[in-house]
Every structure is written in C-alpha cells, then in structure tokens.
Image (spheres, helix red, strand yellow):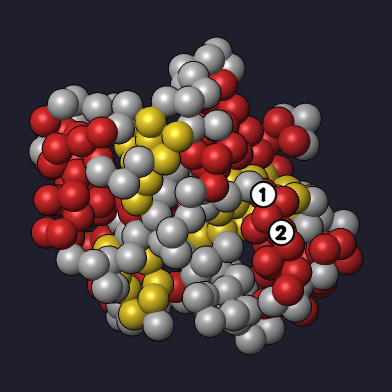
C-alpha cells in the first residue's frame, strides 16, 4: 500500500489558495459531471479559492467552459479554462512557426478541425499531402491503432512535423479506458516522425495557467488530477504540490497497486483523494 497520505477537499482548502484542476476524471467523465462535483467546486470557490481548469483539448478554453457550464457547473465557480489548444496557438504563432494556408492533416474525435481552422490552415484528407500533422483527439474505441499507423505512415516517411495537443495516452470512453491521442502520437514517433507535444504534463501548459494569476508563490498552488503520467507529473515538473484523485483512468486500480505505478513513472503525488467532493 502506498505511503502517500490521504486528504479531502476541505483540508486542501486550508493548505492552498490556487487550484489547477483536471477536467476529465476529476470533475466529469464522458457522460457528465461526477456526483457531488458541481457542489464541491462551488464550495471551493465560496472558500475564496482561485480555480483554473486544465484540459488537453485542441479546442479553445472558451468553448470548453461553455460545454462545462452546460453540464451544470456554475460559470462563477472557476476563473477560466486553459486548454492545450490555446497554448498551441500561442506557441505556434509567437514566433510564427505556422503560415496560413499550410496543408494540415488532423486526427481528432468527431471530425474536429478546430486547431487547423484557428491557425488558418488548409485541411487535407491524406497525411501524405500535408505540411503539418495535428493530433488532437482519438477515436481508438472505433478505429484501431494499426489503422492510425497506416494513416500516418505517408507523412512520417516524408518527415512531416507533427503537433500533438492532447498528450493523454488513455481516454475515458463509455466508462472504459481506450488509447488516447498521445498513444497515436507515439505511433508517429515510432514511424520516424517528430512530434511537438503541447499540453499536460509539459511545462508550457502550467506556465500559461499560472500567468493568468500573476505567477503566485508555487507553495500556494496545488494540481489535482487522475493521471500520474499527466496531471501529477505535470505539477511535479513545475514544482507544484499534487493530488491524485481515485476516479478517472485509475479508478479500477486497487489502492495497493498504486506504489507500482509511482515507481514505474518515477512520479509520486503529495496526496491521495477518494473523489472530488467537499
């Protein structure tokens, strides 16, 4: 059994003033808000805490915030969303690394071409015709990884650069784990392609979020997530305390097996929490 101490949200509120919260696996799954999460987020806000929700989404923070509110969360219960899509636009346009009109091949979920549209790129249907590959989502619950490999091979053979705006290796789909966009991006690297990773656990995501608060003392900030490899490692990368919530992608893992995960990832949270509830 892991020696990491257990905590709860009210205890965290007594320790920290700034909260970086993962969206999927902490506050919601692909079906909707977790029971008690809406009320807990409201309570945290009423306690005077600053809250930013982080998402490895290729879409904008405003778009994600709107969808989040539609699930029943109050817009007043958080400061803002910071998404990997927003960070990608900032990184790729300042300095200018992407020129309008470049041909982009996108792998996403639901046919989303949002990042290509925001960067004013021309969408192509064949990876071999692209100047840039964007991997922002996964439909691996329907499309096999072998099919994605064949899809990407023509671009990898031409050494076309790739941007992955969702480094998640796993995703929640219908209550089950499925390969995420990060797993597809790893396939591209295996094929010989080069990937620029944007989003959790990479530091640009966290630095962008903390700038929204004016870069407060790191000792007053905590990251809360359900993934050791993304949320916990990301917080650790920038010197923040972290909490692993036992919902989301590791929900079915027995507590006694957590230590193996921590050792394998060389990452350990500061606290464990059963679920996001007050």
Placement of 244 over or under 126, stated as above or below: below
Give the distance between the C-alpha atoms of the residues marked 2 and 1, in whole angstroms.
Answer: 6 Å
| Residue at image point 54% right, 47% down | 114
Quarter of the image with the N terminus is: bottom left
User: In the rendering, at what x and y percent does residue 44 appear?
Assistant: 78, 66
Q: On the rendered structure, is 243 left or right of 143?
A: right
Q: Which mark is residue 61?
A: 1
Q: Is residue 207 visible?
A: no
Q: On the rendered structure, is 259 left or right of 76?
A: left
Q: Which mark is residue 230?
A: none
Q: Is residue 63 visible?
A: yes
| Residue at image point 69% right, 67% down | 68
Residue named by callout 2: 65
Mark 1, other Cα within 10 Å: few <14 / some 14–19 / many ≥20? many
Q: How many marks?
A: 2
User: In the rendering, at what x and y percent does residue 124 appear?
Assistant: 35, 41
Q: Give yes or no for contact between labels 2 and 1 (Cβ–Cβ under 8 Å).
A: yes
Placement of 205 over or under 97, stated as above or below: below
Residue situated in front as seen by the camera: 19 or 117? 117
Q: Quadrant of residue 254?
A: bottom left
Mark 2 element type = helix
Residue situated in front as seen by the camera: 6 or 273? 273
User: In the rendering, at what x and y percent does residue 120 appear?
Assistant: 55, 32
Residue situated in front as seen by the camera: 223 or 53? 53
| Residue at image point 11% right, 59% down | 146
User: In the rendering, at what x and y percent does residue 62 appear?
Assistant: 72, 51
Mark 1 element type = helix
**Residue that sits furthest to the top in the current view:** 95
């Amino acid at each position: 059994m892991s020696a990491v101490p257990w905590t709860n949200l009210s205890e965290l509120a007594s320790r920290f003033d700034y909260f970086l919260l993962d969206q999927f696996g902490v506050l919601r799954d692909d079906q909707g808000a977790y029971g008690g999460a809406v009320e807990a987020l409201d309570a945290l806000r009423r306690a005077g805490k600053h809250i930013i929700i982080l998402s490895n989404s290729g879409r904008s923070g405003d778009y994600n915030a709107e969808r989040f509110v539609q699930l029943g969360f109050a817009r007043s219960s958080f400061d803002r969303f910071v998404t990997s899509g927003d960070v990608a636009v900032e990184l790729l346009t300042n300095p200018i690394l992407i020129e309008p009109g470049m041909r982009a091949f996108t792998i996403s979920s639901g046919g989303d071409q949002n990042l290509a549209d925001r960067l004013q790129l021309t969408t192509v249907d064949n990876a071999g015709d692209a100047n840039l590959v964007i991997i922002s989502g996964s439909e691996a619950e329907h499309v096999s990884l072998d099919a994605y490999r064949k899809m990407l091979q023509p671009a990898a053979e031409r050494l076309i650069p790739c941007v992955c705006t969702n480094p998640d290796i796993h995703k929640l789909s219908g209550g089950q784990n499925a390969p995420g966009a990060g797993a597809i991006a790893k396939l591209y690297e295996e094929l010989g392609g080069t990937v620029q990773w944007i989003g959790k656990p990479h530091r640009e995501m966290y630095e962008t979020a903390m700038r929204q608060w004016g870069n407060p003392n790191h000792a007053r900030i905590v990251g809360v997530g359900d993934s050791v490899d993304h949320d916990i490692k990301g917080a650790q990368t920038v010197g923040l305390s972290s909490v692993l919530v036992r919902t989301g992608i590791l929900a079915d893992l027995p507590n006694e097996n957590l230590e193996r995960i921590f050792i394998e990832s060389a990452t350990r949270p500061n606290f464990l929490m059963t679920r996001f509830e007050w």
